Amino acid sequence: MKRRIAAFLLGVLVLTGFVATLQAAEKTRTRRVAVFDFADKSGHHYRWWTGQPVGEGMADMLVTALVKTGAYQVIERQEIQRIMEEQKLGASGLVTEQTAAQIGKLLGVDLAIFGSVTEFGYSEDQIGGSLKQKGLGLGMKTMSATVGIDIRFVNTTTGEILTAESINKKESKKGVSVSTDKFDFDNKDKFDESIVGKATRAAIDDIVLLIGKSVKSIPWSASIVKGDGPIYINVGSQAGIEVGEEFAVYRMGEELIDPETGISLGKTESRIGAIRVTNNQVSNGRASQCEAVSGSGFQRGDLVREK
């Protein structure tokens, strides 16, 4: 009987340990990303129903899609613009992998996302006869909409381009239709119901999937916002941080530059201590207050990682 009880208790302990390990493995952290406005290289210069350029409108759609997943903290456009103006990086109006990585580091994000709209518009094929009247076409037609985006994701820690893809989506419909050559929608609902709206949504969905694959290759990290007195880090309950969790703190050192390519290979780093979360609800869960477990002299910008 005693052996059976001992075996049972051992089994409970093993199962409890397995569940705890499984729960730890399943714990997910929201990732911090910055979405820059896409450049419009389609040649049409259409405007969104809000008056925004197409590239800016698509970037907004991507931000909304990422927020809805619950897996990302997305930096607001105003904050990106503020940093660009402070660093005088937006004068040319073009974002490169270098400027995206630089701004991303200053914003404390894992991934910087930028790109350009290469195609955006309609094409029309006449199937049968048509009646022309007052600039309108009436007849059997195939109306198609094509949306093309060149997209890039940059690891802000290393400056490495993780993903560079060209996405093209096409939607079409057939039937008797009246059409003009204008791109004109009164509101979001009309845009979503249109074939160009559906092609745009399909392209955005593909980008979200690519982002999910890319961030898996980047180790989770956060940053110390304030190190003297109470310690604050730039993640909180919104990022899945829990009270009592402990993190290792690292300080970045010399940047390593490849002498042949001139590309940054990252920075040297050294572990300087550990911290424990005491309040994960700072700034409505966007930051946490911590206490030192070991080490001292923590500074703004020091890197925080899971132990």
Image (cartoon, grey):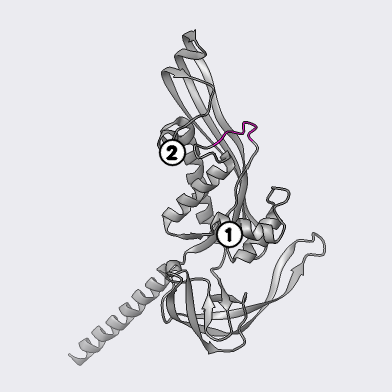
Residue under label 2, please give it: 188
Image quarter in which the N terminus is found: bottom left
Image side of residue 259 versus residue 167, left or right: right
266 relative position to 143: left or right: right
**Can residue 38 be seen in this snapshot?**
yes
Q: Position of residue 263 (x, y in %)?
A: 75, 61
**Residue nearer the viewer, 296 or 29:** 296
Instruction: Work out whether 240 lies above or below 277.
Output: above
Q: Nearer the viewer, residue 269 or 194?
A: 194
Whether residue 156 is visible to the viewer of this picture, yes or no, is no
Determine the CA span between mark 2 and mark 1.
25 Å
Question: What number is the disc on residue 79?
Answer: 1
Q: Is residue 65 above or below residue 218?
A: above
Q: Earlier in the sequence, mark 2 or mark 1?
A: 1
- The amino acid marked with disc number 2 is Lys
Q: Quadrant of residue 272?
A: bottom right
Give coordinates of residue 248: x percent, y percent. Answer: 55, 80
Of residues 193 and 213, the one nearer the viewer is: 193
Magenta region: which residues?
42-47
Q: Secondary structure at mark 1?
A: helix
